[in-house]
Image (tube, rainbow, N blue to C red):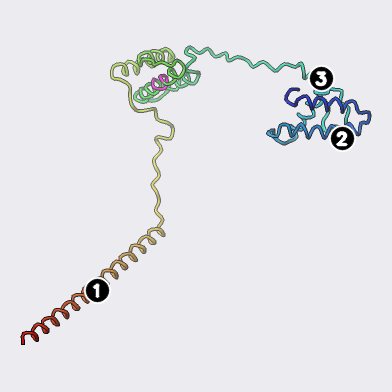
Amino acid sequence: MKEYGSNVQKLADYIISLPDKEQRTKYAHILIELMRQIHPNMREGQDYSKKLWDDLYIITNFDLDVDSPFPAPPKEILGKKPMTVPYNQNRLKHRYYGRNLEILVLKAIVTETYEERKAFVSYLVRLMKQFYQTWNKDSIETEDCLQQILELSGFKLQAEIDDLRANGLMESSPKDGNSNRPRQQMQVNPRNNNNNNQRNNNNNRNNNNNNNRNNGRDNRDNRSGGGFKSRDNRDNNRRRR
């Protein structure tokens, strides 16, 4: 097996040549650990250990006679071919759109209201343009998409498509099943309201204290300024005398 290299092949041939079974078993376990280190990215587990022993039996051409924790695999697995995967038998008229688009067209047919069917067809047209551009590296006209939807629906969306041809596509998308559910109003915890009110009261109290301190400081400055003015007037009068 190429993934283990020629050295592992030589070691496996040497183990087969040993006459003592106990010694062969001991060296086989050592070789399994070496094979495990060659592929450290493989996951540990019973299945992986079984795969290593199966590979060792294959490397030795099923001539390995040791006491292994797993039985030797049958020789028929080497020539066994994998099962054939059956080909998808769904006949798609437009393969680049896929089977899911046909399912969406069927869903658009059974949509309840006329306006929702028009919105559904408009959504399908935009979706088809994206798919077409991905696979063909080119754009497709809206009229071509509408005609293809009409054919896929078995002409059951004739009225809706004629309306879209006359008035243009709708900007809205089809509603999902959760769109009609009423939104739940956010409940307010009364404890949080009390905490917020208390914080606001504390902030107002702090603002009032700061204002009172500032007013008192201004008054002291005014009084001190008046004292300086009166002292200056007395000094001027003395000089005149």
Gap in Å between the C-alphas at discs 1 and 3? 103 Å
- Could you say which disc has been placed on residue 158 in the image? none
Gap in Å between the C-alphas at discs 2 and 3? 24 Å
Residue 65 position in % (x across, y down):
88, 27
Which circle's residue, 2 or 1, is located before the other in the chain? Answer: 2
Query: Looking at the image, do the residues carrying marks 1 and 3 touch, with CB atoms under 8 Å apart?
Result: no
Q: Residue furthest left?
A: 241
Which circle's residue, 1 or 3, is located before the other in the chain? Answer: 3
Category of crowding for the residue at label 2, using alpha-carbon neighbours closer than 10 angstroms: few (below 14), some (14–19), many (at least 20): some
Residue 201 position in % (x across, y down):
33, 65
Q: Which amino acid type is shown beneath numbered disc 2?
A: Lys
Q: Quadrant of the N terminus?
A: top right
* Left or right position of 3 against 103: right
* Left or right position of 241 against 90: left
Category of crowding for the residue at label 1, using alpha-carbon neighbours closer than 10 angstroms: few (below 14), some (14–19), many (at least 20): few
- Could you say which disc has been placed on residue 26 in the image? 2
Q: Is residue 238 above or below residue 169?
A: below
Gap in Å between the C-alphas at discs 2 and 1? 96 Å
Q: Secondary structure at mark 1?
A: helix
Q: In the image, which residues are magenta? A: 125-129
Q: Secondary structure at mark 3?
A: helix
Q: Quadrant of the C terminus?
A: bottom left
Report the predominant secondary structure element of the magenta stretch.
helix
Residue toward you, 116 or 11: 11
Identify the residue at image location x=14%, y=79%. Answer: 229
- Could you say which disc has been placed on residue 75 in the image? 3
Q: Is residue 163 above or below residue 40?
A: above
User: Total number of numbered labels?
Assistant: 3
Which residue is the site of mark 1? 217
